[in-house]
Image (spheres, rainbow, N blue to C red):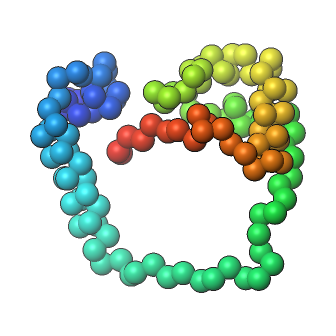
Amino acid sequence: MWSTVDRLLGRGGRACDYISADELLIFFANKVKQIQSTTSGAPLPTYRPVAPGVSFAEFTTLSSEEVAAAITRLPDKSSAVDPIPVWVLKSVADLLTPFLTYLFNCALATGYFRTCLKDSFVTPA
C-alpha cells in the first residue's frame, strides 16, 4: 500500500494534495534517522588535494551517435521538471538528436549552462 507521502512524490498513483506539513516532516525526519543509523559506523571521508595540472579545461565534443545512444538508455520515467516526457523524447530522438548534440556541445565549449537546465526534482528512495 502506498503511503500519503509516496503519492505526493508521484509514486504509486496520483499526487495527493492533502498531505500535512507534519506528515512530510515525519517522513523526512525518519529518512534522515535511517540513513544516520546505517552509516554511523562508517569511517570519516578523506580528501586529497587535486594534483597540479589536473583540470577539465577542455571537453571532447559529443557525436550525434553518443547523444542518440544516451537517449535510448534513459529510463522510461520522467521528472516533474522535464519539459518533454521521456517516451516522447525517445519517439522523436531521430529528429531531435542533431539539435541536442549542438546544444550540448555549445554548453561544453562555452561552459555556460542555462539556469533552466540546472533544475531537478529529487524524490527520496
Image location of residue 51, percent across then percent down: 73, 82
In the image, 105: left or right of 77? right
Whether residue 52 is visible to the viewer of this picture, yes or no, is yes
Image location of residue 62, percent across then percent down: 84, 43
| Residue under the point 54% across and 81% down | 47
Q: Nearer the viewer, residue 86 or 84?
A: 84
Whether residue 66 is visible to the viewer of this picture, yes or no, is no
| Residue under the point 73% across and 16% down | 92
Which image quadrant for residue 67? top right
Relative height, residue 107 to residue 1 (above, below): below
Relative height, residue 35 to residue 62 (above, below): below
In the image, 94: left or right of 88? right
In the image, 69: left or right of 19? right
Which image quadrant for residue 16? top left
| Residue under the point 80% across and 17% down | 95
Image location of residue 119, percent across then percent down: 52, 38
Relative height, residue 85 to residue 36 (above, below): above
| Residue under the point 66% across and 21% down | 89
- How many numbered callouts? 0
Q: Quadrant of the N terminus?
A: top left
Q: Quadrant of the C terminus?
A: top left
Q: Nearer the viewer, residue 112 or 84?
A: 112
